[in-house]
Amino acid sequence: MVEIRGISASPGIVWGRAFIYIDNNSPVPKYDIRPAWVENEKRRLAGAYEKAVAEVEGLKCQTRGFIQSGEILDAHAALLRDPEVRSEIEGRLERELLNVDWIAQETFRAYGERLGESGDDYLRERVTDIHDVGQRLLSHLMHVNKVSLSSIREKVILVGRDLMPSEAVEMNPDIILGLAMEKGGRTSHTAILARTFRIPAVLGLPRFVQNVRPGDEILVDGNKGLVIINPDESTRSVYDQSRQVWLRRGEALSQFTGLPSRTRDGVEVPLMGNIEVPDDAEKLSMYGASGIGLYRSEFLFLQSRRLPAEDVQMRAYAQVLEAMGGLEVTIRTLDLGGDKINAELSDLAEENPLLGWRAIRFCLSRRDIFKTQLRALYRASVSGRLKIMFPMISCIEEFEDALELAAEVRDELGREGRPFENVPVGCMIEMPAAAAAADILAQKAAFFSIGTNDLIQYTLAVDRGNQRVAYLYDYFQPAVLRFIQNTIAAAHAGGIRVCMCGEMAGDPLAALVLLGLGLDEFSMNGSAIPEVKRIVRSVSLPDAASFAGEALAMRSGREIGKFVRDYMERHFDLSVY
Ligand code: PEP
Ligand code: MG
């Protein structure tokens, strides 16, 4: 039995068999082989081809309707049956006397490069297919599980180095019981998706994969942020009890679902849900959400190999608006880049992506893509109460530029005689520059939404997905709280409301401080709503304000954190966190 501590990324306790999932970044070994081994390497290659073909055929039967996987898998199957690459691998194997994994990787890479340089559009589009097929083949050669997450059939605990958001969005919560990954922080998109899917998760586990063998039993305690490999009987029974307590706690909190989110002094504080895929909208009603404060529209792009067409987007947005039946829905325009990269936009992969060409910057330079999204949003606006917001705004010019494009789109739709609503357009505050200049942005924005995940990352210069510096990622740092305070004060002075849609909004520990700072609305993972509502209902705004005042008078994140934690644990029994 081995116990390893990591970062608590999604609450809950679960155990099951390990499924080791290997990401694209795992290095492929390179070693010399003797001539006598060539035949054996060829047999390995043949076996890998056989498994890869069977896997692709199996996947074809299982693909989900909304992903255009059918035709892609057909292309993959054809590539796997094509003798050209395979005979090239075999030829190189005989000539170069290196292991077949390495040769296969190099051959697929060179083949992809040749296609990429060709003048033919069709051939150039095949590069991603070549890459995917190469990865699949390698996974079988190396006996690791590089498969689509949606193709796993047995209930497992997913163990690996890292998951990309485009991979994590494929997780089926009935199959993936828990997550234990080496990389990632509490506000990485994988953690956010795990919470959305209610999959207990521990991330940032140092050197974890090397300690696990496929099929080992793994216990994931997402509340405490630890995992245990092959727990013994007595440990399991202790955890069984903790799990029962955790589940009973969830049931007890469900009594808040139907109650209004109103403070003791009668102020309504809307508690909204964050979603990543349209189907999640319906689930929000079971948590009593007052609407959707953040729909991360880029996941529609991550789930699809091609950029979704205007009509496809329009239907997805309309589906969300209709599911919410007249409640407000705030859709954030594309926030691609950083860790969120669509297969068709691979040039988004940059050396320093978090400071690079992402979100609104990308949209303003790819106006074709941005305009298509804005047209889809406005066309969907007749299906409910839509609000639009722009991500990663750093200055007023950017915001005005985006507003202008939105106006252009409205004119265009008007000329085409298409109906649309004049929806409020807000600004996300997730950069220190935006928080400091909130008074200027408030003159143009219909509302603010504070994205603390990025605001904290940029304020403290801490990569939110990097477990090594996760100890510095702290929203009780005075600098962070002051930015939040300044944003809210500037918004109120400008007569607009402020929502918070970063993960801080769903952390019950932070709820009282945020209320006290004057936050008007909270948007969070649906499952966090009942707990935050319990806190909202039990305080008055003046009491919350004096609590926040006391916290802000302190000089360090540690001091504020301790003050808040002690108070909240005493009054709200939050010890389980
Ligand atoms: C944020 O940065 O807080 C936010 C809500 O956006 P995302 O997590 O998608 O970057
Ligand atoms: Mg963000």
Image (cartoon, rainbow, N blue to C red):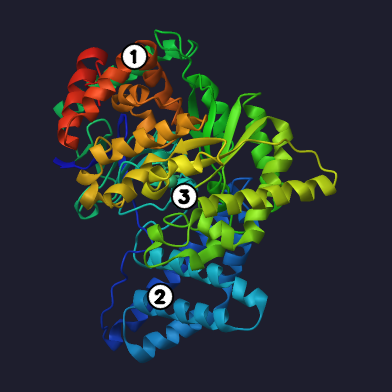
Q: Secondary structure at mark 3?
A: loop
Q: Earlier in the sequence, mark 3 or mark 2?
A: 2
Instruction: Work out how far the residue at label 2 is from the one at label 1, CA to CA, in angstroms.
Output: 63 Å
Please indicate, yes or no, whether residue 264 appears anywhere in the rendered image. Answer: yes
Which residue is drawn at the image coordinates 25% and 47% (left, top)?
204
Report if the CB atoms under discs 3 and 1 are less than 8 Å apart: no
Please indicate, yes or no, whether residue 19 appears anywhere in the rendered image. Answer: no
* Closer to us: 68 or 322: 322
Q: Which mark is residue 392?
A: 3
| Place of residue 379 in the rendered image (x, y in percent of width and height, measured from the top left) | 73, 42
| Place of residue 302 in the rendered image (x, y in percent of width and height, measured from the top left) | 53, 52
Instruction: Work out how far the residue at label 3 is from the one at label 2, CA to CA, in angstroms.
Output: 37 Å
Report if the CB atoms under discs 2 and 1 are less than 8 Å apart: no
Look at discs 3 and 1 and give the one toward the viewer.
Answer: 1
Neighbour tally class for label 3: few under 14, some 14-19, many 20 plus, Cα within 10 Å? many
Task: Give the residue at mark 1.
Answer: 542
Q: Which mark is residue 105?
A: 2
Neighbour tally class for label 1: few under 14, some 14-19, many 20 plus, Cα within 10 Å? few
Give the residue type that dot 1 points to.
Pro
Which residue is drawn at the image coordinates 50% and 80% (left, top)?
113
Q: Earlier in the sequence, mark 2 or mark 1?
A: 2
With respect to residue 508, does 147 lie above or below? below
Which residue is drawn at the image coordinates 44% and 50% (left, top)?
165
Q: Secondary structure at mark 2?
A: helix
Look at discs 3 and 2 and give the one toward the viewer.
Answer: 3
Q: Indicate yes or no: mark 3 CB to ligand 2 under 8 Å.
A: yes
Screen quadrant of the C terminus: top left
Corner quadrant of residue 175:
top left
Left or right for 418, reference 286: right
* Closer to us: 478 or 117: 478
Q: Earlier in the sequence, mark 3 or mark 1?
A: 3
| Place of residue 49 in the rendered image (x, y in percent of width and height, measured from the top left) | 47, 69
